[in-house]
Amino acid sequence: MKKGIHPEFQESVFVCACGNTIKTRSLKSEYKLEICSACHPFFTGKQKLVDSAGRVERFMKKYGDKPVSTGKKPTKVVKKVGATTEKSAKTKKSAKSSKKESD
């Protein structure tokens, strides 16, 4: 390696907004982070909602009671008919008679 062209690799501290500090080595001596693995919802499993300028309230006020569209077509609802057809009635009768014969 050539001398004098590479930056110095030094001890550094990463400081999160939550107060967590991580010591490692890097080019700068100190870094300031907004979020780290100790306070990030993905790693902690806690949902932390940061609301900037009331956007959540505005959204809930506008769309809160409306159903959410998933982009899929709604499934067809098949109505059940109370009366059985002749074919299904015959099938049920033949099944009952075969059970009686086997007993």
Image (cartoon, rainbow, N blue to C red):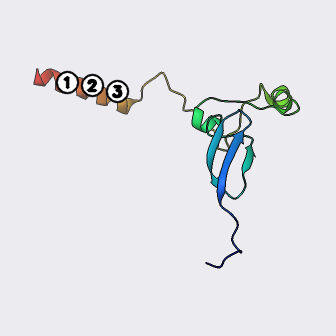
N-terminal-most mark, 1 or 3: 3
Quarter-of-image position of residue 51: top right
For label 3, the residue is 89
Quarter-of-image position of residue 91: top left
Q: Are marks 2 and 1 in contact (CB under 8 Å)?
A: yes
Residue 97, numbered circle: 1
Q: Quadrant of the C terminus?
A: top left
- Towards the viewer: 84 or 3: 3
Q: Residue furthest right?
A: 53
For label 2, the residue is 93
Considering the numbered disc 1 on the image, is that residue within a helix, a strand or a loop? Answer: helix
Where is 30 relative to 27, above or below?
above
- Towards the viewer: 27 or 40: 27
Where is 51 relative to 26, above or below?
above
Where is 69 relative to 81, above or below?
below
Q: Residue furthest front?
A: 3
Considering the numbered disc 2 on the image, is that residue within a helix, a strand or a loop? Answer: helix
Label 1, label 3: how far apart the Cα atoms are = 12 Å
Residue 40 located left or right of residue 94: right
Considering the numbered disc 3 on the image, is that residue within a helix, a strand or a loop? Answer: helix
Q: Report x, y in % for residue 49.
A: 73, 30
Amino acid beneath label 1: Ser
Q: Tell me if mark 1 has few (under 14), some (14-19) or many (20+) residues whose alpha carbon lies within 10 angstroms of its own.
A: few
- Towards the viewer: 98 or 28: 28
